[in-house]
Amino acid sequence: MPVTPSLQISRDEKFRIYRINFKSLTELELYLKGDPEVNKSVFKTQKSIYLLEDFAGEPLPAAINYCHGGYETGLGVFLRLKKELESVNVMKTNFRRSVPAVVGSRPHVPNFVAGTPKTMFRLDKAKEKKFIDMYINLAYSGENTDEQIRNRGILTLNLITLFESNDIGVNLHAFEASYNYEELFIADVKLKRPDEIINVGKCYYPLCGKEFIRRVLLRVKESMPFMEKWGLGYGAVLPETLIRKYMGIDDKKLLILAPDEMGIKGKDIYEDATVFFERLNLSDKISIPNYKNHMKNEAKR
């Protein structure tokens, strides 16, 4: 059954803006399986189909199917490094105390004998959970390596784990933002709601699979009612200042950019973690593990 995601087209003094929002990977998959019409006046050749597999990965039909799971290219190394990194994390466990109350789950015998009103025990009130919006830009230049992309994915999921261990729920958006002359394109896919547990299998594909950015989102772009010729490269990566402006990402929201912009080199995961968190500057929000110190200890072994 074809779905119609939210497409907003607007104009300001600089750009004509095309923003398409998907509530989930499932909605994105259903949209593409409905075979939306290609804007052939702009896209004479469908790169989502004809790009070489060495560059763009598996063919488009398989790339679309991976939106509901099953993508395993590089997953073994990803999971191993993710586990190694998480071993450094010190998780904060919140205990709820039992306090005397009028109504509760078990009796408070001394108070009952003394004849005081609070003759029961109940758990004290849980802290009100906070939430944060996190956006990760899937677009990156050709200089970024597969290892850099992989490490950024690991660090993003690790960051979510750290937030949630501090009672902060995460609303995770993955997006592509690009521009060509006076046209600007944004495709926003919601990967996780604050009340959802991280699904590594679901997040791995859009965060690390080259098919997702080079076939799936490219196919979305080919369905846009652009008026200009987007050329051979299908547009340039939008810089951070314009991403924040046109996506409404203020300082209270987290923005994760291309790996090279986050200082990620794709070699040592602990070194990448150190510069990643320095770039985000989150020490006032959560407790950040000392990845640099762990890296030094590992080097001494």
Image: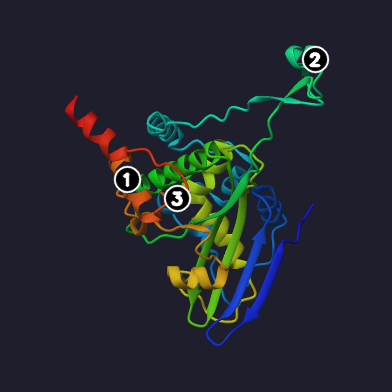
Q: Amino acid at mark 1?
A: Thr
Please, what secondary structure does the residue beneath circle 3 have?
helix
The residue mark sitting in front, 3 or 2, is 2
Q: Which mark is residue 53?
A: 3
In-front residue for pair 138/67:
138
Front residue of 295 and 70: 295
Q: Nearer the viewer, residue 287 or 145?
A: 287
Residue in the image at 54% along x and 61% along y: 218
Classify 10 Å Cα crowding around label 2: few (below 14), some (14-19), many (20 and above).
few
- Tag on residue 274? 1
Residue type, mark 3 in image:
Glu
- Residues at marks 1 and 2, CA–CA distance in whole angstroms: 55 Å
Residue receiving disc 2: 112
Alpha carbon separation for disc pair 1 and 3: 34 Å
**At x 65% / y 79%, what residue is drawn?**
10
Q: What is the crowding at mark 3: few (fewer than 14 residues within 10 Å), some, or many (at least 20)?
A: few
- Which one is closest to the eye, mark 1 or mark 2? 2
